[in-house]
Image: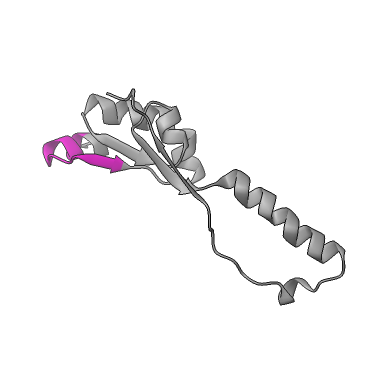
Amino acid sequence: MVSAFEQMEQTHAEAVETGDDPMSIGNVGAIVALAARGRLLSIGPEEVPRAGGVIGYGADIVALFRHAAYFVDRILKGANPADLPIERVSKFQFILNRKAD
């Protein structure tokens, strides 16, 4: 059986994108190491460049939690949760690891 990274090498892939699911985040160090060994650009959530990968991009989690306080405040003051607006993420972060190989 050929591993995913061996198959990427055989097909001359240039990059690997890591999702932000718990399985990927839990194994980000191994994923980044395998990508580096195969000379692949590694892109994903903020954990990727912190683990030695090249690019991290995604919603600013801290800003999301801070904004959640607004909704908690409204609900505690009597607002009906069904009447509160659904909002999209408005603040993103881009992290570039300039020390990555």
Q: Is residue 41 above or below residue 81?
A: above
Horizontal and vertical percent for residue 12?
Answer: 12, 39
List x then y, in percent, for residue 9. Answer: 16, 35
Quadrant of residue 56 within the rendered picture: top left
Is residue 63 rendered to the left or right of residue 41?
Answer: right
Please name the residue shown 69% across and 55% down the image: 68
Which of the image's four quarters has the C terminus?
top left
Nearest to the observer: residue 42 or residue 85? 85
Asked if residue 8 lies in the magenta stretch, the reply is: yes
Residue 42, quarter of picture: top left
Q: How many marks?
A: 0
Task: Decide which of 82, 26 is in the foreground and name it.
Answer: 82
Question: Residue, x 82% and y 71% (percent of image)?
Answer: 79
Residue located at (23% from left, 34% from top): 40
Residues drawn in magenta: 6-16
Magenta stretch holds residue 13: yes
Taking depth in this image into account, of 37 and 97 the one nearest to the observer is 97
Q: Residue furthest bottom?
A: 83
